[in-house]
Image: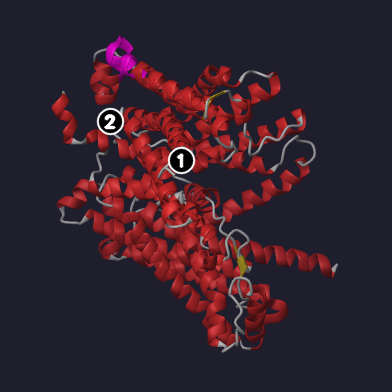
Amino acid sequence: MALIELVTVAQALIYASLLSLMGVGVTLLYKTTKVPNFAHASFVTLGGYVNFSLISAFGWTPYLGLPVAFVVVGGESLLLFFLVLEPLRKRKSSVALLMIATLAWHIAILGVLGAYADALQTLLRVPTRNVVLSYLDFSVGPLPGIFFVSITVTVVAAVALYFAIERTTIGIALRASMENQNLAESVGINTTRMLGIAWFLAAGLAGVAGALLPMWTQLNTSSGDTLIAAMFCVSIVGGLETLYGAFAGGLILALAQIVGTTLLANSVGVWVTGYEPVVPLLLMCIVLMTNPKGVGGMKFWKRFK
Amino acid sequence: MNGIFEGILLFGLELLAYIAIYLIVNEGLNIQLGITGVTQFGLVLYVSGGAFTAGYLATRLGVWIFHINSRGLDFISGNIILTTEVNSFTQSQPLDGIALLFIVIIAAAVVGALLGVISSVPAINLRSDYLGITLLAFGEILNVFGTAYTPLIGGPPGVIVPDVWAWAGGSRFVASTLTLMVLAAIAYLFIEYVVRTPLGRTFRAIRDNEVAAQSLGKNLPRCRLEAIVIGSVLASIGGALFVLYAGSVTPSFTRYTWTFIPWLMLLLGGIGSNVGVLVGTASWFTIYDLILYYKFALQGILPFDVVWLNYIVLGVVVMLILIFRPQGLIPEKPLRTGAEKRKK
């Protein structure tokens, strides 16, 4: 018997892709708006329910809903940014108040989604809690379709993000607004619009990750809440100041949480699995105490520049 | 007629009891967030810590204090039998009941202090937003232990705890509410006192200008840690009292109820103002009862569970306060010092 089965590694890689998609948004928003965005949890849950609604109400095939989830969730984040965060930023509110504003937004969206899920349940007569859609998935040999789709989506997103930010004019303007907002404004960049673009992209990626969630595991109105600690862990392990670090962070956390817990469960006992949610927190604490800049902020990378 | 009056009385007593419990927790948040400016998003950690301490210790302590023969019964599977036996003792001996209450409070305070240190050590030296993220991540973690480790509080079904006010008989709710109100008043006066000490002035200096405080030789991480520990002790005591008052505990302490709602109350009253905490807590419960009242009127008309309206309304209320009245109902006023009074 192999020490660790291929299926477990595949699970870890799916989880890593989803986490990276969420974490990269957290980092992007932190870098642009300087606020740890707790509403990311609601982005993920909303994405999941958009995809689920399209599948259950209109019979769409599972992966067709991804662009719709991207746009809808991106739109939600624009509402949050322009209705709530911009007025607060204009009156120079402290980071603590911006953070509680994102948490308040998350709570309100949680209520809307809960009401929506209830209404959908009475309307369509399908269960809208603990949704699992993996039976709709295709499979290649022992591996489910979500394995290929999630990894493809993540790689495409990473490459597209890289080119959009490093190679296009808008990307340069975006980076300028991240580095120094006042200076960017003085050369004629509309920083508010740039931040809006960043919010749309970041939230859209989280929405896509959420849309993929029911294909892999259960979708609940509390899905985002359960994942929020993991999202921030990914972002911190990768480095809150380095955008692409989130992809490394996602991989590290997924390996630690899924492969690590499975190895421990095999050697120590099955009871270990009950403590699995502690892993992101532990990893986050270790990184913060030893290397707060995260993997992406290590001096090691400077050699390649 | 008598029955209606008793119903209103019980309703009022329960309202006062919950205001008292939340006031203790909120004073904990106030010293951290309002006075020192710590971005405390993990308040639920300390509340659940105190609650689980009460759930774990209360019956065990009762059995030990009253020399009850446990007859080999487990504290989890025999929870109801043993707790009933402890209750038969607290029914007849008021002093023992009160002693049990205070031992549990002290234990919860110790646990709260420990949790305060553990949760803030990883990020206390970093910028405040890192600290906020870490505290948020810590928040609901004790629920994982409460669920997975059954000897603590019996896993998801939870355990019941002895009634430390059983001696009051029919006026149990009067006695418990009075006790809670006295404790809440002590917590309120304690924070009022702390704010006036040199330590409290240091806390506010750090909140208002980190660099200036540092240039005067104040050790930022150390002061923040002190504020967090004071606050977490209070929050933890609040959690323990919540469990003792309600009579049972389950591992289901959520970020919404014990972090977001206290923040909401503080924002409502005015961050940093101690009177504001009192006003905010009381007015929140008034709003909540109004929501409760209209909610049931809407039940059946709306195609969804009206519980979701709470989330929507409260989320929107917080955003509106933040945008239109960030100073709250009672804005913080500068403290009058002795020197200032002499000048006049």
Question: Residue B267: horizontal and vertical position, in percent?
Answer: 47, 47
Kindly tell me whether residue B183 is visible in this rendering.
Answer: yes
Type of amino acid at the residue the image marks with label 1? Ile
Quadrant assignment, res A158: top left
Question: Residue B300: horizontal and vertical position, in percent?
Answer: 80, 39
Quadrant assignment, res A200: top left
Mark pair 1, 2: CA separation: 19 Å
Within 10 Å of disc 2 (Cα), the crowding (few <14, some 14-19, many 20+) is some
Q: Could you tell me which chain the residue with mark 1 belongs to?
A: A
Coloration mode? secondary structure
Furthest-right residue in view?
B1
Please indicate whether residue A186 sits to the left or right of residue B42 in the image. Answer: left
Residue B161 sits above or below residue B72 on the image: above
Q: Residue A163: within the magenta? A: yes
Residue on which disc 1 sits: A228
Q: Earlier in the sequence, mark 1 or mark 2?
A: 1
Type of amino acid at the residue the image marks with label 2? Thr
- Residue found at x 37% / y 67%: B193
Question: Residue B54: horizontal and vertical position, in percent?
Answer: 52, 70
Furthest-top residue in view?
A169
Q: Residue B237: within the magenta? A: no
Residue B254 sits above or below residue A20 on the image: below
Residue A244 sits above or below residue B171 on the image: above
Q: Could you tell me which chain the residue with mark 2 belongs to?
A: A
The disc at residue A242 is 2
Instruction: Choose between B171 and B88: the one closer to the eye.
Output: B88
Q: Which residues are magenta?
A: A161-174
Please indicate whether residue B1 sits to the left or right of residue B186 in the image. Answer: right
Position of the C terminus of chain B, as image quadrant, is: bottom left
Cβ–Cβ under 8 Å for marks 1 and 2: no
Which element is circle 1 on? helix
Instruction: Choose between A267 and B194: the one closer to the eye.
Output: A267
